[in-house]
């Protein structure tokens, strides 16, 4: 089993992608990018913090919040972040996000979540 967190777009989450249901369903059913693992336990969903995106500070805060309670092995970059960048004019650079998250966490980073 792998423990994971999902990084999501603050503007899309709960406005268009209600309750992150597609990501959670895909993780539970091992679909999309989750299929490479036997079982995925989502231990957190962390938003970018809103435009222009504060992913690294939010992730640092999340890491402090869960310290002593839980840990995770993998960071998934949600489809909503990809959509925000590719379609919504989000100023974030996806490659830079991946690089910074890897540097901060030392964890595997996977771009994408569900297949829908």
Image (cartoon, grey):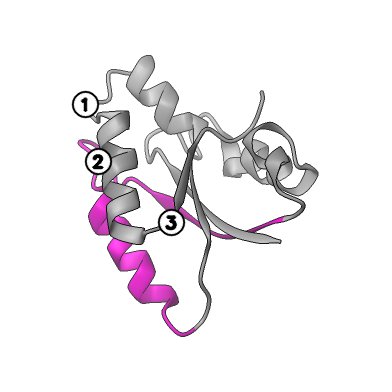
Q: Residue at x 63, y 35 (%)?
A: 33
Please give the residue where the numbered disc 1 appears in the rendered image: 91
Please give the residue where the numbered disc 2 appears in the rendered image: 53
Tell me the tag on residue 17: none
Mark 3 or mark 1, which is nearer the start of the sequence?
A: 1
CB-based contact (under 8 Å), mark 1 and mark 2: yes
Quadrant in which residue 59 is drawn: bottom left
Q: Give the Cα separation between the discs numbered 1 and 3.
A: 24 Å
Q: Give the Cα separation between the discs numbered 1 and 2.
A: 8 Å
Q: Position of residue 84 (x, y in %)?
A: 37, 25
Apparent side of residue 3 relative to residue 74 in the rendered image (left or right): right
Q: Secondary structure at mark 2?
A: loop
Assess whether residue 18 is covered by the magenta stretch.
Answer: no
Q: Give the Cα separation between the discs numbered 2 and 3.
A: 20 Å
Please give the residue where the numbered disc 3 appears in the rendered image: 107
Mark 2 or mark 1, which is nearer the start of the sequence?
A: 2
């Amino acid at each position: 089993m792998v423990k994971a967190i999902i990084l999501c777009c603050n503007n899309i989450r709960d406005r268009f992608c209600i309750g992150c249901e597609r990501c959670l369903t895909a993780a539970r059913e091992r679909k999309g990018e989750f299929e490479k693992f036997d079982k995925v336990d989502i231990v957190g969903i962390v938003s970018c913090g809103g435009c222009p995106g504060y992913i690294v500070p939010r992730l640092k805060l999340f890491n402090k919040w869960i310290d002593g309670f839980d840990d995770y092995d993998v960071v998934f970059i949600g489809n909503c972040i990809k959509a925000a960048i590719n379609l919504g004019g989000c100023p974030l650079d996806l490659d830079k996000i991946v690089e910074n998250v890897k540097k901060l966490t030392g964890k595997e980073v996977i771009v994408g979540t569900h297949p829908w």
